[in-house]
Every structure is written in C-alpha cells, then in structure tokens.
Image (spheres, grey):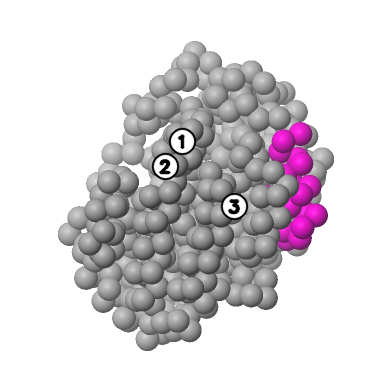
C-alpha cells in the first residue's frame, strides 16, 4: 500500500471547510435525550451474547492550570481535594457497569484521558486501577493496549514507574509547542527538560509506545518557530506524532477568548506550517496515518493500515475494531453494540445519579441500518484510504451504485481534482486526497446537510 502524502496547496485552499472528525458516525451531535438507561442495558444484553472484548475509557477532568487553546471538558482547580468525591463516584460507576457486562469479556484496550489523569495522586490511581481489575477482566500479560495521556508538568519518575506497574504500556505526552512566546500566549509553560525526562523515564521502565502531541495554528507561531519545536522532538524519536490543527472558536469555548485574535497566524501561515511538518516527518521516516496522525512504519497503526485493518472510534485510531467501548466519568462517550451513549457533563448531576445507583447516561443514539452502512463506508475510507464496493455489498446486501448513486455523482469532481480514483469496483484515496479525507467522508454523511457548519472545525 502506498502510504505517501501529496501536499497540494491549491486543492487544500479550495476544499478547506468545516466538517466532522468522524471518531464516530453518526457524530456525537446526533445523540439525543430520548435515549435512556434502559436502551443501554438492553443493548448490553445483546452484546454479552456475542462475548466480544472490551475497551474502557476513563475521563479525569481536572487540570491544575488552564491552557487557553483547550476545548476539552475540564475542571480547572489547584485544590486536589476536588478529586476525592469524583473518584468515589467513578468507583461506583465502575461497579455498576461491571455488573452489567459478563466477567469473561477481556479488556483489550484501556485509556485514561482528560483533563490531566495524573492530577490523581499515587493512592488514587491505585484505587482506580484496583477497582477496574475487580470488576473487569484486565490482561496481566502486557498484551493489552493500555494507554494514558500525560502532562509532563504533572509527572515525575515515580509517577511513571507507578503507571507502568499499574499496567500501562503506552504513553502520550502533551507538548503543543516549545516556543516561549507561544507558550506564554496560550498559558502553558513547559520546558524541554520536563518533557524529555518523562519520555526517557517511560522508555526506561518499559513503555512500548510513545506519542507526542503538537498543535499548529496557535498564536504567534511561525513556520520557523514550529520547525524548531518539531526538530527538537524528532531528536528523541517518538513512535507516533499527533499534530493537531488548532480550531479557534472563542464564541464556543470561553477559555479561547483569552487569546488575542491579533496574534493568530494567517491561514497561509498555517498551511505553510503543515507543509513543513509533512516534509520533515516524511524525511524522518514517519508514515501519515490520517487525521493529524503520523507513525513509524513498524508501528501497529501503520501495519494495521497497510493490512486494511485500521479502525477509528471515540479514542481515535485503533487496531481494536472488535471491542465494545465503555466510557466512565463525566462527558465520556461509549459504543456498545449498535448504540452510542454519553454521560452527563457536570459533577453535580453525576453525583446525584450515582447516589441513586443509576448509570449517569443523559443521551445517546441507536444506529439504524442506514447508519451502520454509512459508518462502515466512512470507517474504511478514513482508516484505510480505500473502499471495495463488493465488501460493503456482501455485508449489507445492497447494490452500492444504486444505494449511493447520488454520492457517487458528488464524488466525480473529486476524481477530476485527483483526490480519488473512482472505479466500478471501489474508491481509492490518492496521495493528494489524504489530507482531505474528511471532505471525502462528508459525501456519505446524510446528517451533515442538516447541521450548521460552524459546529465543526476546519478540515485543515
């Protein structure tokens, strides 16, 4: 499989509009309040009959300081005591969920995100993992994909050792940018020494995969300044990069209003930064996985993509397409069987529901036959950059050219522009189309026309 990437500035400018990131289809905007805990419980019964493996996501929302660019659901506080009642409720939720799922269902994937998961102290992290092991069947042979997001400012060598002892084997470090002016503009002061010492500690204790998060499009960034950050990170050779496009939407996210609009780089500068990023990472031997992600050729994601087995869920790219995903904590989203569900978004409601031994679900959606069909099409395209019509036809008992006749017509201009190769047997996303994969997937999104474009970030 050709995993190269072509950077066509003219095409990018023409196609650069707002659209979903497709960590799910339908997107989270389709979740609704008519979905109840009973719907969720019924789906678990069906899911248990299939006895498939599980993926667990835990949302730890607390942060010591606020990063002005952040659009995540977080609670900014320096009072560590605030984590105590939240952890108590999280343990209740683990017990409630654990009682619903068959104990023989193995957890292949586990992830702590946030917020800042290491806001929890050593004892609290031990409590959380002990409760998880009590109620779910975690692997003990280190073959699971157990990952955690790390803020190097909130971590030391003892923390890294403990996380490894708890069973974590993958680590993702938030960096964003090393330039002092950019760090000051976004209120995230973080030294290179802090960051790279955590990376060294993780490798020393046996973490088998390391990821670095960077963001382009932040205030005061230039092509040269971001190149310096990237060069510094390349010297330590992480297994993966996540290089995100900053979506500046101060009308939606209050903390972003603290960024001076006059400091924002122009659209041209952002594109120039992205082009330089692509050039440097390709020269360094990394493969473009898709949607802001790069990995070394021998990384599991790159291998899965070459073999046509890559998957995408609410946690991003994954090699575990067979897992039901259970979300724990406020705002977390899961998928069990054919339903998506999301937990309540505030601590008070979360506490109230769990005090009544109720699952803290406040909305969800059950996928119909068309949703599942379109989800399969979008997943194949966004993960593997190709789609064989016969595979979809056999799985869903349709004639692709009839069912998607309008969509195939809408794809023709993309073929003319060299983004895809559209044939009678399938769709192949070409090198020039990979950066614009969201645009291609949007063709198959039946809900998109009903949505306001400003609800999504730009594709580049």
Q: Which mark is residue 82?
A: 2
Predominant SS along the magenta part: helix
CA distance for labels 3 and 2: 15 Å
Name the element at disc 1: loop
Residue at x 44% of width, y 66% of height: 325
Q: Earlier in the sequence, mark 3 or mark 1?
A: 1
Residue to which mark 1 is pinned:
79
Residue 139 in sight from this viewpoint = yes
The quadrant holding residue 6 is top right
Q: Relative to residue 206, is residue 418 depicted above or below?
A: above
Q: Which mark is residue 122?
A: 3
CA distance for labels 1 and 2: 6 Å
Question: Along the horizontal axis of the image, is 341 left or right of 18?
Answer: left
Residue 16 in sight from this viewpoint = no
Marks 1 and 2 close (CB-CB < 8 Å): yes
The quadrant holding residue 39 is bottom left
Q: Residues within 10 Å of mark 2 (few under 14, many from 20)?
A: few
Q: Nearer the viewer, residue 336 or 77?
A: 77
Which span of residues is magenta-colored? 193-211
Q: Which mark is residue 65?
A: none
Marks 3 and 1 close (CB-CB < 8 Å): no
Residue at x 66% of width, y 30% of height: 190
Question: Along the horizontal axis of the image, is 159 left or right of 102?
Answer: right
Give coordinates of residue 102: x percent, y percent.
Answer: 41, 82
Question: Along the horizontal axis of the image, is 229 left or right of 44?
Answer: right
Residue at x 43% of width, y 49% of height: 84
CA distance for labels 3 and 1: 16 Å
Q: Residues within 10 Å of mark 3 (few under 14, many from 20)?
A: few
Name the element at disc 3: helix
Give coordinates of residue 304: x percent, y percent.
Answer: 64, 67
Residue at x 66% of width, y 56% of height: 162
Q: Earlier in the sequence, mark 3 or mark 2?
A: 2
């Amino acid at each position: 499989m050709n995993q190269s990437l072509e950077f066509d500035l003219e095409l990018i400018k023409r196609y650069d509009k707002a659209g979903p990131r497709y960590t799910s289809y339908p997107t989270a905007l389709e979740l609704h309040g008519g979905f109840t805990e009973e719907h969720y419980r019924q789906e678990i019964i069906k899911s248990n009959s299939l006895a498939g493996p599980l993926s667990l996501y835990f949302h730890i929302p607390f942060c010591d300081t606020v990063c002005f660019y952040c659009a995540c659901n977080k609670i900014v506080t320096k009072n560590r005591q605030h984590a105590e009642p939240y952890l108590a409720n999280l343990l209740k939720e683990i017990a409630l969920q654990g009682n619903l799922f068959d104990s023989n269902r193995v957890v292949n994937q586990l992830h702590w995100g946030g917020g800042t998961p290491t806001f929890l102290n050593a004892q609290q992290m031990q409590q959380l993992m002990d409760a998880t092991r009590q109620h779910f069947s975690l692997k003990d042979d280190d073959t699971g994909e157990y990952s955690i997001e790390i803020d190097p400012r909130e971590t030391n060598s003892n923390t890294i050792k403990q996380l490894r002892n708890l069973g974590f084997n993958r680590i993702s470090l938030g960096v964003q940018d090393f330039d002092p002016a950019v760090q000051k503009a976004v209120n995230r002061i973080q030294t290179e020494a802090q960051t790279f010492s955590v990376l060294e500690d993780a490798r020393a204790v046996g973490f088998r995969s390391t990821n670095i998060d960077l963001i382009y499009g932040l205030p005061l960034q230039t092509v040269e300044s971001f190149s310096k950050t990237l060069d510094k990170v390349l010297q330590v050779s992480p297994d993966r990069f996540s290089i995100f496009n900053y979506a500046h939407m101060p009308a939606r996210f209050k903390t972003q209003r603290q960024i001076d609009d006059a400091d924002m780089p122009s659209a041209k500068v952002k594109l120039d930064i992205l082009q330089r990023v692509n050039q440097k990472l390709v020269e360094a031997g990394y493969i473009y996985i898709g949607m802001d992600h790069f990995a070394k050729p021998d990384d599991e994601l790159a291998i899965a993509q070459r073999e046509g087995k890559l998957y995408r869920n609410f946690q991003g790219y994954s090699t575990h397409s067979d897992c039901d995903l259970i979300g724990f904590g406020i705002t977390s989203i899961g998928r069990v069987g054919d339903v998506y569900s999301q937990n309540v978004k505030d601590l008070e409601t979360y506490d109230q529901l769990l005090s009544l031994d109720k699952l803290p679900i406040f909305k969800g959606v059950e996928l119909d036959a068309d949703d599942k069909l379109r989800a399969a099409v979008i997943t194949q395209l966004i993960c593997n950059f190709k789609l064989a019509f016969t595979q979809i036809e056999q799985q869903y008992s349709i004639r692709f050219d009839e069912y998607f006749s309008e969509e195939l017509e809408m794809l023709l201009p993309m073929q003319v522009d060299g983004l895809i190769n559209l044939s009678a047997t399938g769709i192949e996303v070409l090198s020039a189309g990979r950066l614009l994969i969201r645009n291609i997937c949007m063709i198959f999104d039946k809900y998109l026309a009903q949505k306001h474009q400003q609800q999504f970030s730009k594709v580049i």
